[in-house]
Amino acid sequence: MTTSSLTNGRMPRRRVLIAGAAAAAAAVCNSASLGQTVFWAKQERLRILCTGPAGSVPDIIARTFGEALAGVFAEHVVVDNRPGAAGQIAVQALKSAPADGSTWLLGQGAIASLYPTLYGKLGYDPARDLVPVSLAAEMNLGVAVGNAVPAEVADTRMLVEWMRRHPGEANAASPGTGTLPHILEVMLFDHARLDWRHVPYPGGPPAMAALLGGQVAVLVLPEGLLLPQLASGRLRMLGTSGPERSRFSPAVPTLAEQGHAQLVMREWFAFFAPAGTPARIAEQASQAIGNVAARTGLARRFEDAAMTATQSSPAQLAAKIEDDRRAWAPLLVDAGIRGDA
């Protein structure tokens, strides 16, 4: 567990993320998207549990929103990193948190929509233990290779052929078993009937280090984590997962363009509150998130990381979770994809 800071771009442990302005008796959130004005007593402290380690995509999202929310929803905001077990460690921490609006969880949508299908035994029930608050961000995934894969491998078809000829080197890293990057790898390589090995890591940064160090051949991560190393030439991105080419890497073809129509997907992250949180508090939190998400500066910071800041009402997030569950659960079952296999 780490609690970290954005001060001067550094990430020390056990420090307050942002200290707000002088205490006020109340705060007002004007949400243009919801057309409502909500009043609440500003809290002293907000803790955001994060499913990823420092430097990961969920950490970036949690920190960026946390900085914007400081002084608005709470005087002080801290990010509490609880990586591991594909987000389940952070969920367990949320279960023991007070249901008073002082603790949120920022995690991948799969923890609520896909994990009941992926895992035979979960330590929580999403419908019972996670209160939807708001969407936070969306992004494409990218399929990347490092120096362990020859330079002439330029697309996913060539990658599959190379992996088939080199079964001892046919491995792929992800930021955790059961994450959407892992699911994409299974659907891509199992569909090609490859003999390959999945190598899970507790988040994107250690998975990236393994790719750059040559310990793994392939890595699937959110596009924004891949772009800096793509620019430096330390990795090659062979495809992106969106419905059309990404504006952040327009030279990279989509997986659908390369014949993988079943691999059109976008990763999304959302905020959740503990079970028992009153609907009024969840709505207040949602509208505070919507208010700061609409700010030009925050939106630009997400764009710089190849992500799109977004928000929703609790009801809209609940509907998205159900839509994803209905769309993905049959595919996961048919493909035999298991998080605990």
Image (cartoon, grey):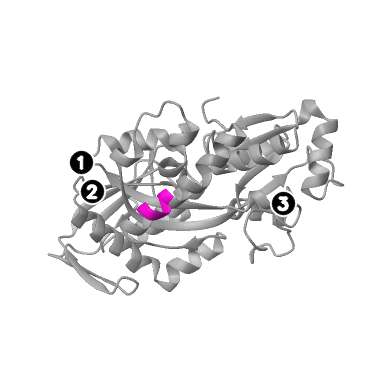
Decide which of 103, 266 is in the foreground and name it: 266
Decide which of 42, 255 is in the foreground and name it: 255
Of the two numbered discs 3 and 2 on the same chain, state the one appearing first in sequence.
2
Rounded to the nearest angstrom, the CA distance separating label 1 from label 2 is 7 Å
Which numbered circle lies on residue 237? Answer: 3
**The image quarter in which residue 242 lies:** bottom right
Task: Describe the element under mark 3 as helix, strand or loop.
Answer: strand
Rounded to the nearest angstrom, the CA distance separating label 3 from label 1 is 43 Å
Kindly indicate whether the residue at mark 2 contacts the one at mark 1 (C-beta within 8 angstroms): yes
314 relative to 239 in the view: left or right = left
**The C terminus - image quarter:** top right
**The image quarter in which residue 274 lies:** top left
Q: Amino acid at mark 1?
A: Pro
Rounded to the nearest angstrom, the CA distance separating label 3 from label 2 is 40 Å
For label 2, the crowd category at 10 Å Cα-Cα, with few meaning under 14, some 14 to 19 and many 20 or more, is many
Q: Amino acid at mark 2?
A: Ser
Q: Residue at x 65, y 63 (%)?
A: 244
Q: Residue at x 23, y 60 (%)?
A: 284
For label 1, the crowd category at 10 Å Cα-Cα, with few meaning under 14, some 14 to 19 and many 20 or more, is some
For label 3, the crowd category at 10 Å Cα-Cα, with few meaning under 14, some 14 to 19 and many 20 or more, is many
Q: Which residue is mark 2?
A: 102
Q: Which residue is mark 1?
A: 98
Where residue 318 sits: x, y (%)?
36, 52
Vertical arrangement, residue 267 with respect to residue 38, above or below:
above
Q: Residue at x 54, y 30 (%)?
A: 338
Q: Amino acid at mark 3?
A: Met
Query: Which region is colored magenta?
Result: 318-322
